[in-house]
Image: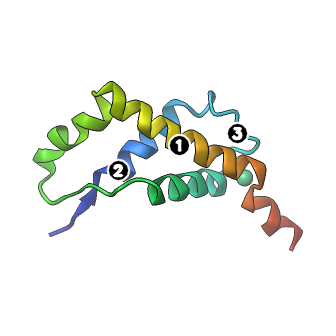
Amino acid sequence: MAIHNIMEEIVCEVLVKHKEDLQLTCGCDRCLDDIRAIALNNLSPRYIVQLEHRPYVRAPYTADRQGVTNIMLIVTKAAGIVSQSPRCQDQVSK
Ligand SMILES: [Zn+2]
């Protein structure tokens, strides 16, 4: 049976929803992946097996103000790091 990291989808949603607010210097797929990876490294994963538990596991991060703010902060920080030195530019220059 597959396991799902609920954090992955939450970070993904936050990124899509707030992409404009984050003022990214580059919004290509590589940079968005980098932001997701950095953000997820700074968040504890929340694995679930049964998808019907998803709403309960998500609630503290999507419905609770403190949880939402915390994830926004981490995603914003990750976006700042990637915006300062986008990896996709390195690949082009090589
Ligand atoms: Zn890029």
Mark 3 to mark 2: distance in Å? Answer: 21 Å
Residue assigned mark 1: 75
Residue assigned mark 3: 24
Q: Where is residue 74 shown, x and y percent of the image? A: 51, 44
**Residue at the far bottom in the pictured view:** 94
Location of residue 22 with respect to 53 vertically, above or below: above
Relative side of 19 to 5, left or right: right
Residue type at mark 2: give it: Met
Q: Where is residue 27 shown, x and y percent of the image? A: 68, 44
* Mark 3 neighbour class, 10 Å CA radius: few under 14, some 14 to 19, many 20 or more: some
Residue assigned mark 2: 7
* Mark 1 neighbour class, 10 Å CA radius: few under 14, some 14 to 19, many 20 or more: many
Task: Identify the secondary structure beneath mark 2.
Answer: helix
Mark 3 to mark 1: distance in Å? Answer: 12 Å
Residue 30 position by quadrant: bottom right
Callout 3–callout 1 Cβ contact below 8 Å: no
Residue 63's mark? none
Residue type at mark 1: give it: Val
Task: Identify the secondary structure beneath mark 3.
Answer: loop
Q: Residue at x 86, y 74 (%)?
A: 94
**Residue closer to the observer: 2 or 57:** 57
Q: Where is residue 57 shown, x and y percent of the image? A: 19, 44
Q: Tally the marks.
A: 3
Mark 2 to mark 1: distance in Å? Answer: 12 Å
**Residue closer to the observer: 58 or 71:** 71
Q: Which of the two labelled residues, at mark 2 and mark 1, occupies the earlier sequence position?
A: 2
Q: Which of the two labelled residues, at mark 3 and mark 1, occupies the earlier sequence position?
A: 3
Residue type at mark 3: give it: Leu
